[in-house]
Amino acid sequence: MKVRYLTGLALMFVVLLGNAQTKKVFEDVKIDIKNASVNTPNSDFASYLDGGELIYNSEVKVAGDTKQETYMMYDVYSTQILPEGQTAKQGENRARITTKLQEGPMTICEATGEMYVTQSYAEETDVENIVFKKENVRLCITKFKKGADGWTEVGPFPFASKDYSVAHPTVSQSGDTIIFISDMPGGLGGTDLYYTVRNGDEWTEPVNVEALNTSGNEMFPYWDADGTLYFSSDGRSGKVGWIFTIQS
């Protein structure tokens, strides 16, 4: 019996898209859940495996405009995954993306060397993240490119607006399709799942994934290499996590 190590939320079951069939997740598999050694007293979330590294968001205290002013911000950190699945000790992690903006959930495409990162707008850097607090912080997505010296900002991902959020991207293995969440007008609920396809240097207009969205909030999508889409939803009674098999 194999042991698999998980980071983040434990998801509950699998639904085949277009089919009412359901089945258990990780059936006949022992799951060992441990507290990662890089955790802090603040928020640590949105983990992403990139080869032998665990990339994640961590809340840190930063200085404001005066010596007395400080506030909490989210930045992107990484740490090595050691044998047997454990993370390196606290203090052996390193900052990957640290701007003057709030950084949230990100996604990486190994094929294209691109990272898409959720960020706040500059005027809202000292306001708590919308995921945890009720302040109406608007979020956008920024593209970074991997080079010899690390990640370099390329520019904003399309469809951003200060009237609504575009956030929590997850990219296909080829880098040609991105699924994200947004509360843009015309959706089914609070935040919905959308997808867009790269056409040359452009991205097609976002399409609402109506088959998956509810009148509640769909959040934190993750598109696995095997075609499985993981996301959380509060619009499905009694269920906190869903897994959908989708066709690319």
Image (cartoon, rainbow, N blue to C red):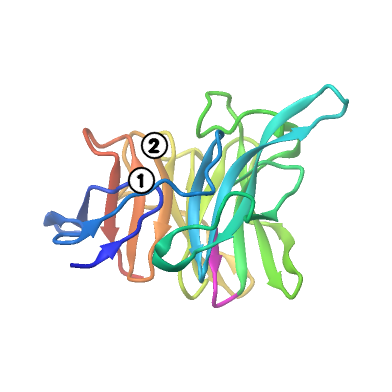
The residue located at (57%, 37%) in the rendering is 164
Q: Where 198 sits versus 231, above or below?
A: below
Locate the N terminus and report the quarter of the image it occupies: bottom left
Q: Is residue 115 left or right of residue 233?
A: right
Q: Where 125 sits versus 113, above or below?
A: above
- SS assignment at label 2: loop
Callout 1 amino acid = Leu
Give yes or no for residue 108 being in the magenta stretch.
Answer: yes
The residue located at (30%, 62%) in the rendering is 4
- Residue 213 location in percent, x, y? 33, 44
Q: Which mark is residue 59?
A: none
Give yes or no for residue 34 being in the magenta stretch.
Answer: no
Residue bearing mark 1: 9
- Residue 62 location in percent, x, y? 75, 35
* Crowd class of label 1 (few under 14; some 14 to 19; many from 20; radius 10 Å): few
Between 206 and 74, the one lying in front of the other is 74
Q: CA distance from mark 2 to mark 1?
A: 16 Å
Mark 2 vs 1, N-terminal side: 1
Q: Is residue 195 left or right of residue 160?
A: left
- Picture quarter containing residue 68? top right
* Crowd class of label 2 (few under 14; some 14 to 19; many from 20; radius 10 Å): many
- Residue 78 location in percent, x, y? 60, 57
Q: Magenta stretch?
A: 107-112
Residue bearing mark 2: 217
Q: Is residue 26 left or right of residue 78?
A: left
Q: Where 61 sits versus 83, above or below?
A: above
Callout 2 amino acid = Asn
- Picture quarter containing residue 144? bottom right
Which numbered mark, 2 or 1, is in the foreground of this view? 1
- Residue 237 location in percent, x, y? 22, 33
